[in-house]
Amino acid sequence: MPRWLKKTLGVILPTDKPLTFETHVSEKIEIISGKCFIKRDQSEETEVYHPGEFFTVPANSRFNMQSTEVVDYICHLE
């Protein structure tokens, strides 16, 4: 079966505290609008993503997402 067939749409509102997400399957997060800050589970590095960029997260892991502006994204599920 081809990868990334299932998709969800999401909106993150500006927040002072990071939001924590847990994955059960591999996910590819595609940023549509806004800028977000991502900190992956067990990593000290914060990554910045802009519209047109994406990041992947392995199954059974966690990541934190934070933004100072509205972020629209597509989550492609494996």
Image (cartoon, grey):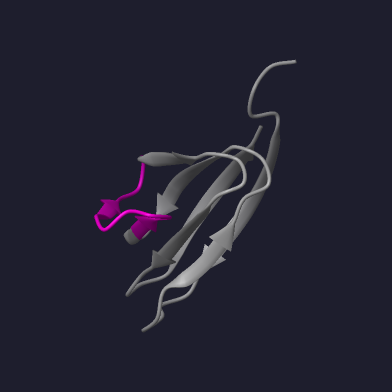
User: Would residue 50 appear left or right of 27 to someone viewing this image?
Assistant: left
Q: Position of residue 1 (x, y in %)?
A: 75, 15
Residue visible at 62% across and 46% down in the picture: 60
Closer to the camera, 68 or 33? 68
- Percent position (x, y) of residue 67? 36, 70
- Residue at x 43% of width, y 55% of height: 41
**Nearer to us in this view, 68 or 17:** 17
Q: Is residue 14 above or below residue 45?
A: below
Residue at image location 27% in from the left, 52% down from the top: 47
Disc tally is 0
Is residue 21 positioned above or below 59 on the image? below
Which residue in the rendered view is the most extreme toward the right?
Answer: 1
> x%, y% of residue 40?
39, 53
Q: Residue furthest bottom?
A: 16
Q: Which quadrant of the view contains residue 66?
A: bottom left
Q: Which residues are magenta?
A: 38-52
Magenta stretch: includes residue 48: yes
Residue visible at 51% across and 67% down in the picture: 20
Task: Identify the image quadrant of residue 16.
Answer: bottom left
Q: Determine the image quadrant of residue 7.
A: top right
Residue toward you, 61 or 20: 61
| Residue 8 forms part of the magenta stretch | no
Residue 55, image x and y in percent? 41, 41
User: 15 or 61, which lies in front?
Assistant: 61
Pick out the residue farthest to the top.
Answer: 1
Relative to 8, does residue 5 appear above or below in the rendering?
above
Answer left or right for 48 relative to 15: left
Q: Quadrant of the C terminus?
A: top right
